Image (cartoon, grey):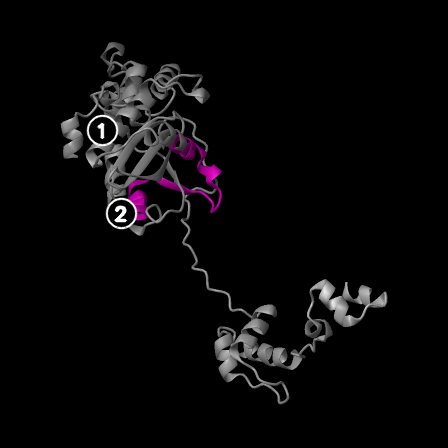
Amino acid sequence: MVTGLCARGISQRRACELSGVSRTGYRYRGRPRDDRLVVEALKDYSRLHSREGYRKAHAKARFPAGTGPINHKRIERLWRINGLTVPRKKRKRRRGKSTCPRPPVPRYPNHVWAYDFMEDSCAQGRKLRFLTVTDEFTRESLTVEVRRSFPARKVIATLSWLFVEYGQPVYLRSDNGPEFIAGALKSWLERSGVGTSYIEGGKPWQNGLAESFNGRFRDECLDMEVFYGLKDAQMITERWRTYYNARRPHGSLGYRSPLEFKRSWAERNAGALPPHPRSLTPCGPKQVQETMMEREKGAVAEDQLPPAPDPAAALGSHPCVALSSGRADEEYSEPSPTARKNS
């Protein structure tokens, strides 16, 4: 603006007054500093000492003569502009190695279980952790364990109890959390004959059924309740789990509850899965085989063969399709005010 006013014949003093610009500032001409020699010296130092920063470079680098005064602020500016900042070392996260080459697809009850952790807090602010275990085929919630913390030994104790009650799964699917890749847990699963299936890092959709259950659990239970203590949280979560398994309709199961779907599947596939019904007879499979061999030789009559049990009963007693225990049909009452206060 000052230049345009001066071009119209107005003096520089008057043009600066009209424009609100000081004459000193208008007349100033910058003299850019040539930092090429300093930058080359910094780059040479960075190549020799790749894990040192600009402070050590300012103290130890050899700058050529004629570069003028160099303070640490000038070195820091040139260090950052030229991309010489030392990157921080990222801690390499351990990844669990699956025992199956690709993510397994559940084909029957107790084929693939998925387990994961969730967090919430009590009314007093103390942290609560939830271990959720789900059967991927039936969508049944096998347990929602509530504790203050979950080291690997407590995860092993929970899984041991589930193996006794429901039978042993073929695979356990999980993410790469520290509790799931702990050496004690992996060794225990290997001794138990249970395979592991870890999802890839940054791909939670590979554990989609567990994530879906966690979303329903948080939306319908955790966000709707106030927990006054650990016992109160255990009571409320178990009551919701009972409702989820026995009465809540599930869209992917034809709007049936997981237990209804499990019972109907067991009725349709009675006798279709191992073990053979004769292996569940009181005399045992070895005696049945010996009796059959004697019958072929003509030593045993047809009516002396041990009777085969009902296939549906045999299938229901097998761990891989065993239905939930009777606790699934129990009702849980709301904790009394005294119990909440004591919790």
Q: Is residue 308 left or right of residue 73?
A: left
Residue 296 in sight: yes
Q: Name the residue beneath numbered marker 1.
A: 235
**Which label number is shown at residue 92?**
none
Q: Quadrant of residue 166?
A: top left
Q: Position of residue 297 (x, y in %)?
A: 29, 19
Kind of element beneath mark 2: loop
Taking the spot 51% from the left edge, 75% from the top edge, the residue there is 54
* Magenta highlight on residue 192: yes
Residue at which label 2 appears: 151
Q: Amino acid at mark 2?
A: Pro
Residue range highlighted in magenta: 185-214
Which residue is nearer to you in this view: 284 or 2?
Answer: 2
Residue 339's place in the image compared with 45, above or below, is above
Residue ID at (47%, 38%): 206
In reply to whether residue 48 is colored magenta, the answer given is no
